[in-house]
Image: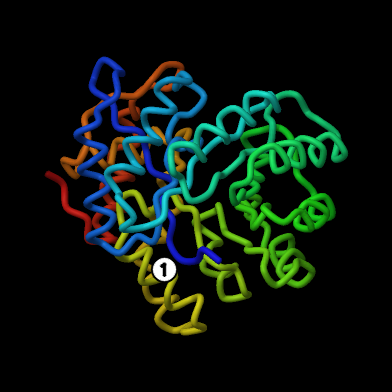
């Protein structure tokens, strides 16, 4: 079972929006050196909706090749088309990813039976470990706990990234899920609490900019060291909040640029962080002892 701190890594881009592979290598080295347990490449934080198919493959291949087995690589392969999700998931397997993360089909608003059949079809088509991803605030559809538990019976569906932010929902899953089915937090502000209750880690936006602290917090929370986990989480909490002051990944890309790790590139319809929010992010960086370039 994968556990710990997994970064929902941004996709570095040049100012013109083209992929910046050198910066991606730099970010991967940064995470490995700081203790991140795994890279989630081309997830929704990685701007998957505006990355085309060939770029998607390139980003997965580049990450798998450059990581070279040093940590785990999870590929984002979700789509609102089941056929496309199968194609992306097969590509990730062929390119050597350790697992795939599949966001719930967005905009279509499938029923719970539709969600079940979608994920079942992908799991049966591609023999690779698959993690469900429920983020109703972005997709417009909510994968229920009951449907998740039905899907947990499928051998290669191994966990869920729960980004509902509901400790009640997360606790219910932890109590009812099979022992070999992992519950990961996809909501940084409530991630520590979920791990203290039995969650197996985070798939995190905050980890992009504070990987060492996030890794340390996860280890403390998973092992039940509540005092240490709370102390570390207090340093991170402003980031947990302010990294969502505008639509993700706008704020986290701005912070990474301030750290000197990436260029300013982001793809339309997203635009760079408004100047009105610079101060709030700088204060959050200071609380986590993150220095600007």
Task: Give the quadrant of the N terminus.
Answer: bottom right
Q: Is residue 24 above or below residue 272?
A: below
Q: Nearer the viewer, residue 240 or 106?
A: 106
Position of 268 with respect to 147 (left or right) is left
Q: Which of 181 and 270 is in front in this view?
A: 181
Disc 1: which residue: 233
Q: In this view, does 199 lie above or below 97?
A: below
Q: Is mark 1 on a helix, strand or loop?
A: helix
Position of 44 with respect to 181 (left or right) is left
Q: Residue at x 21, y 30 (%)?
A: 263
Residue lying at the far left in this picture: please name it: 293
Q: Which of 260 and 149 is in front in this view?
A: 149
Q: Residue at x 50, y 59 (%)?
A: 202
Position of 1 with respect to 273 (left or right) is right
Position of 39 with respect to 90 (left or right) is left
Residue 242: percent from left, percent from top:
41, 47
């Amino acid at each position: 079972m994968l556990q710990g701190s997994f970064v929902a890594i941004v996709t570095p881009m040049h100012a013109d929006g083209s992929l910046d592979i050198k910066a991606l290598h730099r970010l991967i080295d940064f995470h490995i050196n700081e203790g991140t347990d795994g890279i989630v490449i081309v997830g929704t934080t990685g701007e998957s909706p505006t990355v085309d198919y060939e770029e998607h493959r390139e980003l997965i291949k580049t990450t798998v090749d450059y990581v070279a087995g040093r940590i785990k690589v999870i590929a984002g392969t979700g789509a609102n088309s089941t056929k496309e999700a199968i194609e992306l998931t097969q590509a990730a397997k062929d390119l050597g990813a350790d697992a795939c993360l599949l966001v719930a089909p967005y905009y279509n608003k499938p029923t719970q039976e539709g969600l079940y059949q979608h994920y079942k079809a992908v799991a049966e088509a591609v023999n690779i470990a698959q993690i469900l991803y429920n983020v109703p605030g972005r997709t417009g559809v909510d994968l229920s706990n009951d449907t998740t538990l039905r899907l947990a019976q499928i051998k290669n569906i191994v966990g869920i990234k729960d980004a509902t932010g509901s400790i009640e929902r997360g606790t219910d899953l932890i109590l009812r899920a099979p022992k070999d089915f992992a519950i990961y937090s996809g909501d940084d502000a409530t991630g520590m609490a979920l791990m203290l209750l039995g969650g197996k880690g985070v798939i995190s936006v905050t980890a992009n900019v504070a990987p060492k602290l996030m890794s340390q917090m996860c280890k403390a929370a998973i092992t039940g060291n509540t005092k240490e986990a709370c102390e570390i989480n207090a340093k991170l909490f402003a980031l947990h909040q302010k990294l969502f002051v505008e639509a993700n990944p706008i704020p986290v890309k701005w912070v990474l640029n301030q750290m000197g790790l990436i260029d300013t590139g982001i793809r339309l319809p997203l635009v760079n962080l408004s100047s009105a929010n610079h101060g709030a992010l700088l204060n959050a960086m200071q609380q986590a002892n993150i220095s600007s370039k």
